[in-house]
Image: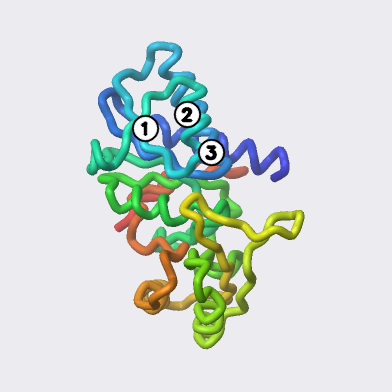
Amino acid sequence: MNETTAKYKQQAAERAVEFIKPGMVVGLGHGSTAMFAVRRIADLIGAGQLSDILGIPCSVVIGDEARKLGIPLTTLEDHPEVDITIDGADEVDAKLNLIKGGGGALLREKIVAQASKREVIAVDASKLSDLLGTRWAVPVEVVPFGWHPQAEFMESLGAKVTLRKHADGTVFETDQGNLIVDANFGPIEDPGSLAAKLTARVGIVEHGLFVKLATDVIVAGADGIRHLIAE
């Protein structure tokens, strides 16, 4: 991530944090943009400008950072309804559908998103696309047992599939102990239809197509900050 991209991500994240009010249960997404949001929330709490906040982290990494920074945390078991979630995205289409999961936390991110009254996505302008899949493959979380047939299933739908690995060649595992395969479908004309096919397949735990989940998208770029609202 270059310095300019990081600046725009931070601007978008910090604008998104402005929607948080005292007393809210807040979903804390995963990834670099969510990390900017977590640090801003902690700064506001420390300055006495934000109070009575409870966070629900979407990953172990974000949870660890939030605890370190003094953000009180809770769980969906104790608070099954989330007032607002602040998260990033890998790609956003004109209808505010998303591809998420570049950081590997898509399962927990989607669980928290669907429990949220408001899902606010913060991105830099490079994440906008006319069609999902133009710039990003669809991350798909699969159980380790029999993962290869799931990859073949996605290939039958037209994807080029790659098992995600770390830079050292070891296989990436999610916080749930599952695997991620990145399925490059190319531009996706109907993300809802593809999402339904992936969801119906046994062995696929969850996929990174977030269809009709975002309520707001904050976009930061060279022309300033825009607030997009789902229809």
Q: Amino acid at mark 1?
A: Gly
Q: CA distance from mark 1 to mark 3?
A: 13 Å
Q: Is residue 128 above or below residue 156?
A: above
Seen from this angle, which residue lies furthest top? 48
Q: Quadrant of the C terminus?
A: bottom left
Q: Amino acid at mark 2?
A: Ala
Q: Is residue 152 or residue 18 the one in the foreground?
A: 152
Q: Find disc 2 in the rendering and name its residue.
A: 66
Q: Find disc 1 in the rendering and name its residue.
A: 55
Q: Quadrant of the N terminus?
A: top right
Q: CA distance from mark 2 to mark 1?
A: 8 Å
**Mark 3 Cα-neighbour bin, 10 Å: few <14, some 14–19, many ≥20:** few
The label shown at residue 61 is 3
Q: CA distance from mark 3 to mark 2?
A: 9 Å
Q: Earlier in the sequence, mark 1 or mark 3?
A: 1
Q: Are marks 1 and 3 in contact (CB under 8 Å)?
A: no
Seen from this angle, which residue lies furthest right? 168
Q: Is residue 75 or residue 83 the one in the foreground?
A: 75
Residue 75 is situated, as x and y percent measured from the top left of the image, at: 31, 37
Identify which residue is drawn at 64% across, 39% down: 6
Q: Amino acid at mark 3?
A: Val
Residue 136 is situated, as x and y percent measured from the top left of the image, at: 59, 65
Q: Are marks 2 and 1 in contact (CB under 8 Å)?
A: yes
Residue 113 is situated, as x and y percent measured from the top left of the image, at: 34, 50
